Amino acid sequence: MLIRNYGHLWERRFVFWGNAGTKGHLWGIRTPNDVGADFREQIGIYILFDKNYTPVYVGQVGSGKQRLFLRLRQHKNDHLWNRWEYFSWFGFRRVNGANGSLSEHDKPGKIFKAKGAILLNEIEAALLVALEPKINKQGPRWKDVEEFFQYVEEEQQERSISEVLRKIGALEAVIDAHLKSK
């Protein structure tokens, strides 16, 4: 098996990119009570989506020294900076039980020994999940792959809600002004 876990349509705005003294993280959980895992050092493939959930970029991490978090942070500042809002990732390193660390024995040099048919099924499954093609009736054919959901800190959720309320207030003011001018 190649793909061990994945995150589908995580939101760029909820990634903690870090600040002075902290390096940021890509925290994911399986269930609300899960310890979770930080996928910043994950290797595998990823897809960037625009605000309409259209794929705009596919990339890989792990063949060199780059890992998922660093690559996403680069895209936040490179020529794609304004082209993506969501991302999906498919990771090759499994999550260790209780502490949520990523497995050391699933590093790049040790994982690419799967048979061709297995690799094809894994890649097809990842694309089926990420792209959700309308005509495909078959779902992903993989076993023991875990989905992780993006962990969003309460502070980020509150900030997002207040942004929406502020935009609604501004829109109401524009509508009121428009109606009064008639």
Image (spheres, rainbow, N blue to C red):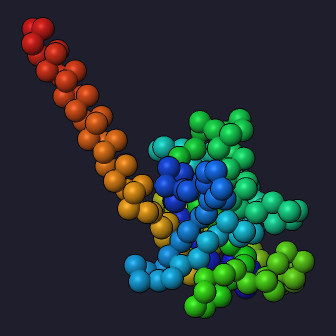
Which quadrant of the rendered structure holds the C terminus? Answer: top left
- Residue at point 34%, 53% (across, down): 158
Q: Residue 117 vs residue 176: left or right?
A: right
* Residue that protrudes farthest toward the bottom in the picture: 97
Q: From this viewpoint, is residue 138 visible?
A: no
Q: From this viewpoint, is residue 107 visible?
A: yes
Query: In the figure, residue 157 lies in which quadrant?
Result: bottom left
* Between 131 and 89, the one nearer to me in the picture: 89
Q: How many marks?
A: 0
Name above or below for residue 122 compared with residue 72.
Answer: below
- Residue at point 48%, 43% (across, down): 51
Q: Residue 73 vs residue 128: left or right?
A: right
Name above or below for residue 35 compared with residue 135.
Answer: below
* Between 102 and 62, the one nearer to me in the picture: 102
Residue 62: percent from left, percent from top: 81, 66
Residue 181: percent from left, percent from top: 12, 8
Residue 89: percent from left, percent from top: 63, 64
Q: Residue 65 vs residue 127: left or right?
A: right
Which quadrant of the rendered structure holds the N terminus? Answer: bottom right
- Residue at point 53%, 65% (across, down): 8
* Residue that protrudes farthest toward the top in the picture: 181
* Between 144 and 66, the one nearer to me in the picture: 66
Residue 127: percent from left, percent from top: 63, 64
